[in-house]
Amino acid sequence: LPTASHLDRVEVVLVSPRNPLNIGAAARALANFGFSRLTVVAPYEPHWREARLAAQSAVGAEKLLQSAKVSESLPAAIADCTLVLGTGALTRRKPRQPVVALPALAPLVQEELSRSGRVALVFGPEKRGLSGSELALCHRLVQIPTHPRQPSMNLGQAVAVCLYELATRLAAQEASAAALVPSARARHAASSQTPSADLERLAELIDQVMLAARYSPPSMREANRRDLRLLLRRLALSPADARRALGFFRRVLFRIQP
Amino acid sequence: LPTASHLDRVEVVLVSPRNPLNIGAAARALANFGFSRLTVVAPYEPHWREARLAAQSAVGAEKLLQSAKVSESLPAAIADCTLVLGTGALTRRKPRQPVVALPALAPLVQEELSRSGRVALVFGPEKRGLSGSELALCHRLVQIPTHPRQPSMNLGQAVAVCLYELATRLAAQEASAAALVPSARARHAASSQTPSADLERLAELIDQVMLAARYSPPSMREANRRDLRLLLRRLALSPADARRALGFFRRVLFRIQP
C-alpha cells in the first residue's frame, strides 16, 4: 500500500454499535488500510468492553481500540470535522443531501484533506442505521453500490470496503498530485470549510432564535431543527461566514428575547 | 449498482473455512455485490452446518448458502475455470506466479469473461492461508494493498473488498465497452484458455511420466509436482495445445512404462 499521508485526518465514527465482533472487525479494517482514528459514539458498555478484550488477538487492532475515543453524542464526535460523510443503505428514506457513490468519493475527501480539513466517515448501528437527526449532521451521504436484492451490508464489511476504497484511491491520487506545481496546489488549498462544532453552535443559536420568535409550532420543532442543520451544510459556509452569522443571530436573539 | 452481466461466471471458492461467521459473511458479500456462485472446499462439517443455519437471518445469503457447491478438493472446485486467482497475504512466502494488485484486477477478469472463460477467486483458510500446492493451481495471485503493520485481513472482509472492487469496476468497464464496435469485440473474443481440469489431467499424466522415467528423487517429487503445475499455467496453453500435449505424453508414457 503506497501510504497516503493524510489518513490521520480521517475519523471513522461508529454510532452505537451493538455487536462486539463488528467493533473488532471495524478496528481491524482501520489497521489493515492504514487509518488510526476510531471514535465510538454511545457504545453499549458491556459490548464495548468485550470488543476491547476480544481485540487482543488481532495485532494492530488492539492498539487502535485502546486509543479509540468514546463520545456521548455524534455532534461531540465530529466537532472538529469539516466534512462529515454518512453511510448506509438509502432504501428506506429519501436522502436530504447530495449522495456520492463510494467509487467517486476519494476526490472529495482528497480535496478536503488538501485544504487542511478533517473528514468523518460515520457508520450507524447495525439494525436501524443512522437516524434522521444524525443524518442531518452529514454534509453528504455515501452509497456503497450494492445489489438491489441485498443492499444492506454487514457493519464490519461496510467499513472494510469504504476504507479499502479510500486508502487505495487516495494513494493513487497523491502519487499523481505530487506532479502538480506548488503554486497550483497552494491556490487550491486557499478556501476552507467550517468545523462541525461551529456549525452546531450556529444551529443552536438559530434554534433559540426560532424559539424566541415562536417560529415553529411545537409539532414542527424537531423537523425544523433538522432542516436547519441540513441547510447550514448545504450552504458550505466558510469560517468567516459562520462567524458573521453567529454575530448577526446573537444580535437578533438579544433583540427579540423577552 | 449497474449490474455486470457476467458475474455468474465468477466462482468464489473458500478453502476449508473454519469460522461459520466468516462463511456467512462471505455469502452475504456475494449477495451484496451481485455474485451467485459459491464453492466451499472440504469444509469442517459442523461449522458448515452452523453457517447454513445462521444464514437464515440474512436474506439473499441464505439462498446462496443453500445452493453453494461443496467440493472435496480445490482441483475439483476449479475444474471448469480458465483463470484461477489466489488471494492472501504474501508476507510469508515468495510468490511463484505473477502478482496483481486488487485495484488492477478487473481488466484481467473482464478479458477472461469476454472470451467466455470462467474465473475462480480462491480464499484460503483463516489461519494458514492457501498452501503451496493450492497456490500452484493459481494462474495469478491477487494482493489486497494493506498496511505493512497489519497486512492480514479477516476472511469475510477480504471477500467483501475483493467483490466490491470487481463488481464496481466490471460494471464501469461494461458501460464503456458497450461503445466498442461489434467486430472488434468478436476479434477480441477469439482466443481462449484451457480449463483447470484439462491442465490437471495433463499434469497428472506428466506426473506419471516423471515417475515412470524415475525423473524425481523421492525427496523432490512433491516440489516437482508443484513446479510442473506452475509451469503449465505460466505457459498459457490453449485448449488445442493442451490436447496436443496430452497426446504426446500418452505416447511417451506408453513407451517408457515397463
Image (spheres, coloured by chain):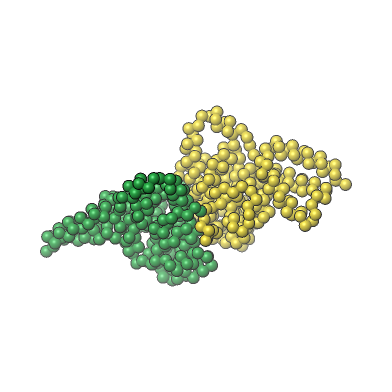
Chain colours: A yellow, B green
Is residue B126 something that shows in the picture? Answer: yes
Q: Is residue A214 left or right of residue A107?
A: right
Residue at 56% x, 42% y: name it: A108
For residue B226, which quarter of the picture?
A: bottom left
Q: Is residue A199 left or right of residue A175?
A: right
List the single residue furthest toward the front: B182
Along the line of sight, the residue nearer the viewer: A18 or B111: B111
Q: Return the x and y of residue B19 as percentages of the image width and height.
A: 46, 64
Along the line of sight, the residue nearer the viewer: A141 or B187: B187
Residue at 57% x, 37% y: name it: A114
For residue A44, which quarter of the picture?
A: bottom right
List the single residue furthest toward the right: A258
Along the line of sight, the residue nearer the viewer: A57 or A179: A179
Q: Is residue A94 left or right of residue A154?
A: right
Residue at 29% x, 55% y: name it: B194
Q: Return the x and y of residue B105 as percentages of the image width and height.
A: 40, 49
- Quadrant of the rendering where the N terminus of chain A is positioned: top left
Q: Return the x and y of residue A59 as percentages of the image width and height.
A: 49, 53
Is residue A38 something that shows in the picture? Answer: no
Residue A246's place in the image compared with A217, above or below, is: above
Q: Return the x and y of residue A206 as percentages of the image width and height.
A: 76, 46
Q: Is residue B17 left or right of residue A17?
A: left
> How many numbered marks does the figure carry?
0
Residue at 37% x, 49% y: name it: B111
